[in-house]
Amino acid sequence: MAGLLDWLTAPQTIFFLTVTMVVFVALQLSAAVMVYAERKVAAFMQQRYGPYLVGPKGLLQPIADIVKLIFKEELKPKAADTLLFAAAPVISAIAAFTAFAPVPFGASTTFFGFLDEPMPLVVADINVAVLVIFAVTSMGVYGIVLAGWSSNSKYSLLGGLRSSAQMISYELAYGMSLATIVMLAGSLSLREIVDAQQGYWLGFIPKWYAFINPISFLVFATAGIAETNRAPFDFPEAEQELVAGYHTEYSSMRFALFFLAEYINMVTVAAVSTNLFLGGWHGPFIPEAYGWIWFLIKLAVLCFGYLWLRWTLPRFRYDQLMSFGWKLMLPLATINLLVSAAGVLYFGL
Amino acid sequence: MPLGHYLVLSGLLFAIGATGVFVRRNIITLLLSVEIMLNAVNLAFVAFGRQFGTVDGQIITFFVMTVAAAEAAVGLALVIGLFRHRESLNPEAFTSLKW
Amino acid sequence: MGFDQLLFYVFAAVAVLGSLLVIGQTSPIYSVLALIVAFFGLSGLYVLLEAPFVAVVQIIIYAGAIMVLFLFTVMLLNVPREGASDWDRGHPHVRVWPVRIGTVLGVVMAVQLIWALSRTVGLGAGVADQRPAASEVSELGRVLFTDYMFAFEVTSILIIVAMVGAVVLARKREN
């Protein structure tokens, strides 16, 4: 018992709990910020004002949304499978939060001397981090497919099956581009992949993998957008086609969980892209201990890119989407893997 | 943790899978029980691999997983074909060699 | 007991309970989901055995791909609960005794295996006692591509054969 108490009050445990709490709260705040940013960016691109009534410049709009969702009535179709209907949004939300756990967002720090030795700013420092993210993303498919099935309605079932088929198709290209970066970096740990991107060529071009292997970056970003069911790959949840796809029958907090899971997935894909391709938390002018500022800046740029894509490109039709994933993305990622392997072997990249 | 514990667990899981194959009257659940048996064997391989300090146990596990995936795919394709013909998933419904 | 031992029993209980639910309850969708839970328990056991790569690959391939395949098939065929269709009920092929005898045989198999294992010498040594684990992914890759090269190549042919076979078998007949 004394050993347990010692362990609980050790600096490492307190640091770990602090980081976990910070990441948990920050993910939810980022979802709220993304909701607001999406509407403002959409409005800007469509030459109108976005939300501007609630709070200064509409900044309290996400809070109004959340309050509205909390007070809505919880509906459940009569013939729905109760256990699965309730479990599906929970599975989606759990997968979304867990996927961010192995993602590091800052350099190793002693937290102003609080710790004896530097510990990395990550919830779970796993040495096979890349694979764990991939595995948890595969689990997210279940939330969607079970939601579609348990709602016992045509639109939901079709939307759920299409959405999950799309997700597992693009997981292949996702994994191939991940494998390319793992080969270049020589490690499966995200922290080591970021640290392999330190330094500059010619003094000012950073050694990012986005410059060494741009095809991999493009394939990963595209597959990431398809994985999270964002436009232009959001056919399964398009309003004009399938009412709302797999979350048609959901209301109130369960719908809020799906919503939250989608935005957090987007933030996670952007965070993983930042770590794999854009050098993570390394950047000029800011000391290494505050590298998380650079991480947030790069993350914000990528998220803005995702919002930009949504409101600029038209939606893919479902068969176009599937053929794009299987006939273009997967062969491209595979050939890229072969060429990168040859490059690493013969030129020692 | 003694090696014996892992092997007992593996044997128990294998027996549960085998019971599923004997008892269940639904082809898909039969395939699921076969998957349980394959996983029990994987556990035994990894436990022995750890005991001897080599990675061979884990390598063989990959091959077992790959074969299980291929077998599941082909088995389910067969089930779909059978269902189209007989509208039933009870293995006892398929008693004649020729339709 | 140590933390590792506690974790072993927790994960073992999850795996066994999941497997029992797979074979014990009637709805096929719940069977598939129970098997996914059992796979998570097994994955935890692999982590305890210091094989993190196998643990993660188990989740990716088994729980993330094969079970999705099963789930899609169950949803596509709209499989009813077992024993619920007209074909099953009252048909002379439905027999209660095979189920009972099958269960007894399964229990006998479990008892046999455990009895045989209890009489084997040398199983009391701890798994982690003698030699250090060699579970680096680079070591796995090296052994896979040198000692097991032939099996690796044959497996790739197996996967292609299975893929083509599955597509051909599940195709709608044009007649």
Image: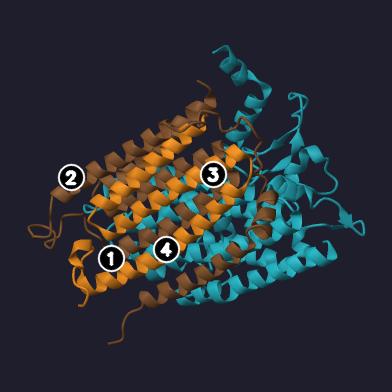
Chain colours: A cyan, B orange, C brown
Local crowd at mark 1 within 10 Å, few (<14), some, or many (≥20)? some
Residue type at mark 1?
Leu
Disc 3 to disc 4: CB gap under 8 Å? no
Q: Nearer the viewer, residue A2 or B45?
A: B45
Q: What's the CA distance linking mark 2 and mark 3?
A: 33 Å
Gap in Å between the C-alphas at discs 3 and 4? 21 Å
- Residue neighbourhood size for the residue with mark 2, other residues' Cα within 10 Å, grouped as few (<14), some (14–19), many (≥20): few
Disc 3: which residue: B46
Q: For the residues carrying marks 4 and 2, which lies nearer the camera in this image?
A: 2
List x then y, in percent, for residue A39.
Answer: 54, 57
When the figure is inspected, residue A239 is found, relative to residue A83, above or below; the finding is below
CB atoms at circles 4 and 1 under 8 Å apart? no
A106 versus A233 height, above or below: above
Describe the element under mark 1 as helix, strand or loop. Answer: helix
Taking the spot 70% from the left edge, 69% from the top edge, the residue there is A338
Q: Amino acid at mark 4?
A: Glu
C-alpha separation, residue under disc 3 versus residue under disc 1: 36 Å
Which residue is pictured at 60% across the width and 51% down the height?
Answer: A131
Q: CA distance from mark 2 to mark 1?
A: 28 Å
Q: Residue furthest right?
A: A202
Residue A8 located left or right of residue C115: right
Q: Chain of mark 1?
A: C
Amino acid at pointer 2: Arg
The residue where tag 1 is placed is C77
Q: Which mark is residue B71?
A: 4
Q: Is residue A1 above or below residue C54?
A: above
Q: Position of residue C99 (x, y in %)?
A: 19, 48
Q: Which residue is mark 2?
A: C100
Where disc 4 sits, the SS reads: helix
